[in-house]
Amino acid sequence: MDGRVLLLVFAGLVGGIVLLGGRTFDLPDVGIPLGQSGLVASTGGAVQGDRSDPNTFVVDKSGVPQARGPIAATEHLTAAFVGKVLDGHRRSGATAPPIALIPVEPQQFCRFSPPEQGSRVVNLVAMGRGLDTKTYIYSDAQLQERTENFLKDLQSDGRAEVPVYPNSFELEGVDIAVSETEYPVHLVLHSGAKTLWNVHLRPGARVTGVSMIGGRVAAISGLPSGTPVQALLKEQLVDCKISPVTRPLVNPVFLSSVKIGVISKEEAEETISNWQEMERRYNVWFKGQFGIPATTTRVGYENGPVFLVGPLPTDETELVPFRDLQEKTLLYVSGETITRGTAADFRDEFRGKVRALAMRVSGGNLQGVALGGGN
Amino acid sequence: MGRGGTGILVIFGVLSLGIYGLIYLAPGLIFFSQVAPMMNAMSELEDIRNPSGAFETADRTLTIRTQDGGKARQTDIEAHVNSRDFADNRSATVVRRVDITDLLADGEELPEAELLDLFVQARIARVAERDCDLMRQVLANACSPSRFSASSVEGTIYNVTTRMNFVQTQPVGPVPGSTELILNEKSFDYDVDTAGAIGWEDQDDAIAQLYGAAQVGCDEIYGQFGNCAIKSVSARQRENQLSGRFVLSWLVPVDPLPVTASTGEGQAASPDRAPFMGGRFSDEPGQDVVSAPAPAPAQPAFDRRAAERAERQRTADQLEATADVDRSLTPYEISVAAATGQSVEVPQPEPFLEQITVTEPVPVGPPTDREAVAETDVEGPALATPTRSNLLIAQKREWRRQARTMFETGQPADIAN
């Protein structure tokens, strides 16, 4: 074969890897032409979707609807293209951290203040990874664990390194576009472990309160000053014996297990019965707090970090203006340490804390923690 | 475009699709092609390294077996024979009870409670060094801590565990002069009464006694068989005693029985040599030591399997039906209805079991008036509308009734509907 042909084949191979190598594509959020079909790739893989119908980018993954394209979850049992909801959305997340971090006192009781009379309650569920936020969280337990590993490394092979991966500490951004101007809205937000809710308001939209449920941290930005924010973190929910149900009871994996006989009928019946009871209890509690049931009102896709609250915009004048996190302050509730900055800033800060703690517990002599170091 | 260009495009397309497919199949492929074989390989590692229990010395190749007639593990053989170096399987584990205030430097104070574990981790190298020093005094001419860790018992009292590799002081003795040997191992318990005294020196004394006992035991075996190794020693300080255990190993030849070929698994027994059975030799030449495989179970009837599959499918369908969420109203419509003061019902899950036990909701703090109202609002009657789930349950009940009638009367049952 001609050498040039081989070279071209090699170039084709490299091109194939670059093009199809599982990379995330940042599709433009706006201006998706109607009436076309195309291959759209996103976090978690690619699907064939119809660019005139955002619902074709929703797939069922183990019973949970999953976003496989630039779509927003809405309250209308239909998806919407992000470009048809938010004006100027950044899919890759924040380029810089928020202006400031403002702590909010945690709830003292196992309940929320009732939503303001006449407010429309919206129940959103964050699932899956979110967007970059340049904001990080770590607990004392994590710091101690890393310090212990650092000490063990010193003891075993004398390595004095502290590996830190900022991504695993970074809050995960979720965007809420509020287009609702007819009613004031009260946001009920079911958070993941470290969700940061970034609210974008259409002129005329009003948020009368926010109740955040779950997570190690409750973090929100983009609210007008004075908006009441309350949170029951995961730890408090456990203490309060509240078990949020944010996903469908039965999923295909469970059903497959029943079909192949891994789970017996009796076990399945008992499990379903327990799940139903758990869901019933949560619905009762949720309605007592917010006046609406939880199961039939929850909105959210796995891997879908954008939500629309309110009517679907019908033209460009109704789009919700996007404001980046770096222009906002962040309110948060958490018993853990929250910090902001670049990944390098965080890595340096965390490493410094690990070394400082190791130095402290070793009595100021890091060499002494290793065998033979006491001499 | 010429033929060459078309060919390149075709090659490019095929290869790209191949790569694309590989990326998505990669996890499965990696598991089945890499991980699973690796796991098998690990489990068979001993066979690969030592297929016949053989061990080579400077002047001969030995076949070494366990007391049960199996192949001795290479690491166990090395722990016994390689007496001048550390061996992975020759180790001592000591669990001391330590008051961690003893680990403080002069004038130093303990950190806050949540940092005590870290504090101990930073100091226990000294404990490990002490353990090795003690071992060198009594039992070994070389000792190296391989692992050490600590766990809280109560307050400032911690269990500190040190694992050490060692080379025993006493000579192990020569390998018996035979080409086929049995590696014997025996475990001995040895507890030392410490009468509640758990100071550093008290524990040192008790551990030294244990080491001494292992040494004495090994000397006795050495006197009888000409070789002995201390394979492992473990000590754990408890409230009133030190619980100890040591394992000794020694080699004995299979002679005088005239056996030179092994008949381990996978090897045919030579008809003129006695096979090796459970550490003893049979007088019946050629006896098969491998158990005959159990008779295959009767094949289950195809129709029975099909019926079971169908039953499981029906169950799955039933379960799936219970998961349906009422979507007759959108979340937006429910939200607007609630905001404008209209009634919003909580849909109750359909009971999957015929008799579902409904317990009271968990109290979550002082209930508000609103909560109290909500409780009464949502505890409505069961749904009257027949659903897929209810129909399936009814269908099954009917099938059971028909089956019972046929069983009792021997006649087909009347079809109810």
Image (cartoon, grey):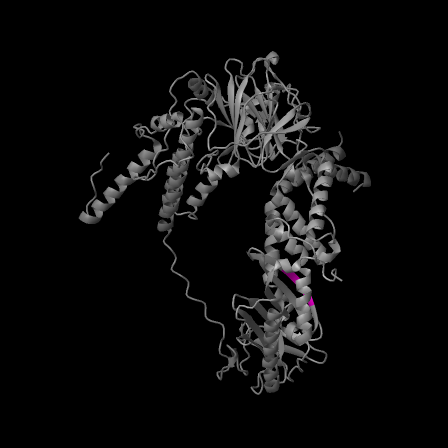
Q: Main secondary structure of the magenta part?
A: strand
Residue name at image x 39 percent, y 47 percent:
A264
Percent x, y of residue B191: 53, 73
* Quarter of the figure with residue A54: top right
* Quarter of the figure with residue B316: top left
Q: Nearer the viewer, residue B333 or B52?
A: B333
Residue B260 appears in the picture as rendered: no
The furthest residue to the bottom? B256
Percent x, y of residue B20: 65, 38
Percent x, y of residue A152: 68, 55
- Is A78 positioned to the left or the right of B83 in the image? left
The furthest residue to the right? A3
Q: Nearer the viewer, residue B301 or B294?
A: B294
Looking at the image, residue B71 lies above or below residue A52? below
Percent x, y of residue A166: 68, 39
Q: How many marks?
A: 0
Q: Quadrant of the C terminus of chain B?
A: top left
- Is A13 positioned to the left or the right of A264 in the image? right
Q: Which residues are magenta?
A: B144-148
- Is A216 positioned to the left or the right of A95 in the image? left
Q: Nearer the viewer, residue A62 or A74?
A: A74
* Quarter of the figure with residue B98: bottom right
The furthest residue to the front? B107
Residue name at image x 58 percent, y 59 percent:
B158
Q: Is residue B146 magenta?
A: yes
Residue A219 appears in the picture as rendered: yes
Looking at the image, residue B318 lies above or below residue A315? below
